[in-house]
Amino acid sequence: STKPSLDRALQVVKCLTMGDSAMTKDRNLDLLGELGLAPCFDEEYSEEMQLEH
């Protein structure tokens, strides 16, 4: 299979929710892009960031 594994996807999401550096976010969004999840997550992430600030 050429699709990333579900384990990898969960690891990426875990890193995103725990990571606070822009580098970590960008790197993980790249991986989420492979899964087709980046757009949705990026919107949610942006909303959370706006609420925090």
Image (spheres, rainbow, N blue to C red):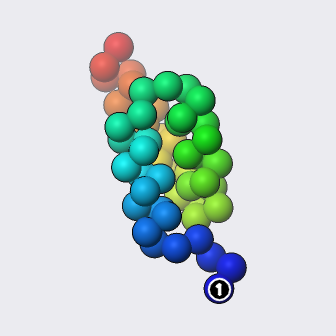
**In the image, residue 40 above or below residue 3:** above
Q: Report whether residue 44 is seen.
A: no
Position of residue 21 in the picture relative to residue 10 (left or right): right
Asked if residue 17 can be seen in this view, the reply is yes
Crowd rating for badge 1 (residues with CA inside 10 Å; few <14, some 14–19, many 20+): few
Q: Eyeballing the image, is 27 above or below 38?
A: above
Residue of label 1 = 1
Image x and y of residue 37, in percent = 53, 58
- Residue that appears at 49% across and 64% down: 8
Q: Secondary structure at mark 1?
A: loop
Dividing the picture into quarters, in which one does residue 26 lie? top right
Count of number-bearing discs:
1
In the image, 44 versus 13, the foreground residue is 13
Query: At 39% across and 22% down in the image, what residue appears?
Result: 50
Residue at the top extreme of this rendering: 53
Seen at 40% across and 61% down, the residue is: 10
Left or right of 26, for residue 49: left
Q: Which residue is rendered at x = 60% and y = 54% of the image?
A: 31
Residue, far right: 2
Up the image or down, 46 lies above or below 51; here it is below
Quarter of the image where the N terminus is located: bottom right
- Which residue type does callout 1 highlight? Ser
Residue 33 spot, x, y in % from top left:
63, 55
Q: Residue furthest left?
A: 52
Q: Quadrant of the C terminus?
A: top left
